[in-house]
Amino acid sequence: MSVTIPFGATSTAAEVVAGADLTGRRAVVTGGASGLGVETARALASANAEVTLAVRDVAAGERVAAAIGARVSRLDLADRASIAEFVAGWTGPLDILVGNAGVMATPELRTPEGWELQFATNHLGHFALATGLHGALASAAGGARVVSVSSVGHVNADVDFADIHFHRRPYDRWVAYGQSKTANILFAVEAAKRWRADGIAVNALNPGRITGTALSRHVGDIAAAPASFDPGSPDVSWKNAEQGAATSVLLAASPLVEGVTGQYFEDCQVAVEHRPGVRRGVAAYALDPDRAARLWSDSLAVIAG
């Protein structure tokens, strides 16, 4: 990227979107009923986008929607029928898709298909949603943007193509989370290549370590015990939800990143290469085009099965 982005780790979603006019643009934010999703949706709505909150808890979504001026539609990313219903119910173009929803460090749980829940929710669900909405994204006037919310946790695990769903290896909730977040980045890499000609930009991001969201419900108060959650990472500071949503909003709405695609961002900047022992940057395997192509092919086969 040749342009300088004047935002960083402490920037907020409101600061990033200030001055933007998204009138006439339609956006979907998954997980828009809590945490980063609320702040992402709030920022987009404040710039006059027509925002749909795609949520499991419709009642919670309706409370948020009433407060920020958005719409609500039910979506359970671990349920193929729910995703198909959402896709079938969408009409017209879609300008912005933010894959924000996710689960982290769950106990060993599986979908009815036998898929490990974190991979199924964080990657396969969003993959099915994005590919299902491809036609709507491609029809957006002026191009569309897809934002894939990953995590620095991706540095903990590559995708184990031989045993993604832990049928043979012992289940480790952090390894499972890590590979699902690596998959979020690999999706962006391959989608950017496949969809460039359709005018669709696809990027992934690390929102940072966020306090006070429901994502940590399976591990307790991670802010109170960072050593157990994120050992050896005193170099990374905590953010609130407004700061955590800033990079998502940058990629979804800012003219500063017009034409940028297939990248991984953190703190509103393109991430540097990950170095061992530092909880920052992007792992080389997460940007590998061969792995991205394989994941795409395998994911298509799985969701079609």
Image (spheres, rainbow, N blue to C red):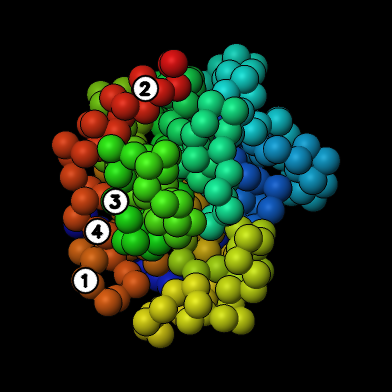
Residue 242 position (above or below residue 176): below
Instruction: Check contact, mark 4 vs mark 3: CB within 8 A.
Output: yes
Q: CA distance from mark 3 to mark 1?
A: 15 Å
The picture quadrant where one finds residue 216 is bottom right
Residue, x 40% and y 23% (percent of image)?
302
Residue 104 position (above or below residue 148): below
Identify which amino acid the numbered label 4 is placed on.
Answer: Ala
Q: Is residue 51 left or right of residue 127?
A: right
Q: CA distance from mark 3 to mark 2?
A: 19 Å
Of marks 3 and 2, which one's residue comes earlier in the chain? 3
Identify residue for label 4: 283
Q: Is residue 251 visible from the viewing direction of this image? A: no
Mark 4 vs mark 3: in front: 3
Identify residue for label 3: 158
Identify residue for label 1: 275
Of marks 1 and 2, which one's residue comes earlier in the chain? 1
Q: CA distance from mark 4 to mark 1?
A: 8 Å
Q: Residue furthest bottom?
A: 234
Q: Position of residue 238 (x, y in %)?
A: 52, 76
